[in-house]
Image: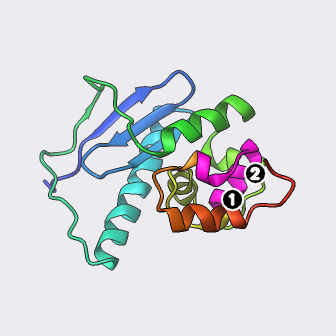
Amino acid sequence: MQARYQIYLYFDGNQYVANVPELDGCSGTGQSYAEALACAEKAMATWVFDAINTGRIPPEPSKDFVLKPPSKPISKSASTPIMRRLHQKFGNLTNRQLMEKIGIEGVSPTTFSGAAGGHGKRWVRLAIAISLGEMPSSLWPHLSKTTRDRDDLCMPTDQP
């Protein structure tokens, strides 16, 4: 049997979540456990692929594939507060549906989720910031000052 990363499945009150704690920030969400698990599988493949392409070695799975409920609060990912705010504003939607509401096309739901955590494509972060009516620097204070300043400079002038 091939060793696999552990996946914790749970319902966070708005959506089903499949979290992969061994891969920092890697998770999937959906309107069912199956959809969340499928999104997490894609996110895991992307995470490992990106790690290899950037010269990092993916961690070895600690155990065989296990589905179990979390024993403690799971998501401490940087995207969680932003995703909660997007769900409060637009409703209980999948990442794909949120992207449609915001007007984001041509990226995967995983890329969108990463941008919500402050990573990845600047234009996706900016679209999220515009939809929430806030400056990127206030949404992602953990980013470098240079990145925060560049993101803020790209915002339309009629934003706060």
Q: Quadrant of residue 9?
A: top left
Query: Mark 1: few, some, or many residues within 10 Å (few <14, many ≥20)?
Result: many
Return the residue nearer the eye: 28 or 113.
113
Q: Is 140 placed above or below 145 here?
A: above
Residue 60: mark: none
- Residue 107 shows in the view: no
Query: Could you tell me which residue is drawn at 43 percent across and 57 percent down?
Result: 42
Query: Mark 2: few, some, or many residues within 10 Å (few <14, many ≥20)?
Result: some
User: In the visual, does 90 lie left or right of 147?
Assistant: right
Residue 43 spot, x, y in % from top left: 42, 56
- Residue 40 shows in the view: yes
Query: Could you tell me which residue is drawn at 24 percent across and 72 percent down?
Result: 56
Q: Quadrant of residue 78?
A: top left
As helix, strand or loop, the secondary structure at mark 2 comes to helix
Count of marks, rendered view: 2
Residue 90 on the magenta segment = no
C-beta proximity under 8 Å, tags 1 and 2: yes
The residue that label 1 is drawn on is: 126
The residue that label 2 is drawn on is: 130
Return the residue nearer the eye: 30 or 55.
55
Q: The disc labelled 2 sits on which kind of residue?
A: Ile
Residue 126 on the magenta segment = yes
Q: Is 46 placed above or below 68 here?
A: below
Magenta region? 124-138
Q: The disc labelled 1 sits on which kind of residue?
A: Leu
Q: Is 73 placed above or below 56 here?
A: above
